[in-house]
Every structure is written in structure tokens, then in C-alpha cells.
Amino acid sequence: MLVVDSGDLFFEKEIPEAVRNSAKLKARLISQIYGRIGCDAVNVGEQDLVLGVDFLRELENTSSLPFTSANLTDAKDRPLFKPYILKKIAGKTIGIFGVIGDTSEIASNVKKTTGGAAVVQDSVKAA
């Protein structure tokens, strides 16, 4: 069995400063639960970035939950997360990748939310 998530797992919208600590706690708990159920990959979605790239990287580093995004890069076109993940299942190698929508609205929101730390590249080309 292969368990994946398509993105926007941790947050639904912008997080007000007053509840950021609770939102971080919620995201940490979700990542632990998904890790325990054996989630094989989580695509990084637009809403997952509302607390910044650094928080999401920290979350990935402190859990067993692997994040992927084939078209999310830094300003120098370096991938922010693994572009793909390979899994061995029932003797077969399965490739998993995710892309974030590349509409101008999503790209603009990601740039604004992350302070320019994340850039959305062409999803078809990345795939």
C-alpha cells in the first residue's frame, strides 16, 4: 500500500500571530500522526507554507514524514524539498512526486507568504 497526501495538510489559511504557537503544535502533531500511519510522501501545498519555509523544513527534519515538491524552489532555482521520492513496494520501485499549482495567483501568494523564499516553477516542466 502507498499512502500520500496531495498538500495543504497543516494549515487552512493565514495564521494570526496570536495563535502561531498553537498552529505549530497542531502541525507537529499532524506530522507525527501521519508518520505513525506510514505516510510515504506529502506534497507541499500553498497553505503548508503560511508559517514559512524554515518551519516546514524543521517539521520535515523532526519527523519521519518526507515532503516533496518538484516545482518549489528558492530564488536561485534550487529545490526546497526533494523533487521526488523512490519507494520499494512489493518488489517494485515507485516514483512519487508532487507539484504545487503554478497559476499566477498561487505563485504570487507563495512569494508573499514566504517573503520571496519560495518560487513556484512551471508544474508541467517540473513533472
Image (cartoon, rainbow, N blue to C red):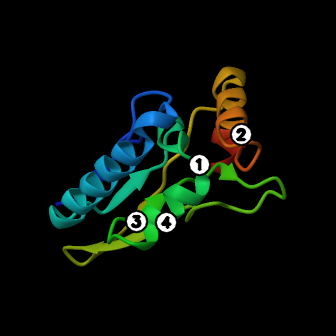
62 with respect to 106 (left or right): left
Q: In which quadrant of the rendered image does the N terminus lie?
A: bottom left
- The three-letter amino acid code for the residue at tag 1 is Gly
SS at circle 4: helix
Looking at the rendered structure, the secondary structure element under dot 1 is loop
Q: Position of residue 94 (x, y in %)?
A: 36, 66
User: Residue placed at 60% from the left, 53% from the top?
Assistant: 53
**What is the spatial separation of the Cα atoms under label 3 and label 4, in whole angstroms?**
12 Å
Query: Where is mark 4, residue-wise?
Result: 58
| Mark 3–mark 1 CB contact (< 8 Å) | no
* Cα separation between marks 2 and 3: 22 Å
Question: Given contact means CB atoms under 8 Å apart, are the residues at marks 3 and 4 in contact?
Answer: no
Q: Quadrant of residue 67?
A: bottom left
Measured Cα–Cα span from mark 1 to mark 4: 10 Å
Classed neighbour count for the residue bearing mark 3: other residues with Cα under 10 Å, few (<14), some (14–19), many (≥20): many
Between marks 2 and 1 in the image, the one whose residue lies nearer the viewer: 1
Residue type of the residue flagged with mark 3: Pro
At horizontal 24% and vertical 78% (from top left) the residue drawn is 91
Numbered badge on residue 79: none
Query: Which is nearer the N-term, disc 4 or disc 2?
Result: 4
Q: Which residue is mark 3?
A: 66
Residue shown at the point (51%, 36%) measured from the top left: 17
Instruction: Count every numbered label the image shows and give the total.
Output: 4
Which residue was labeled with disc 1? 52
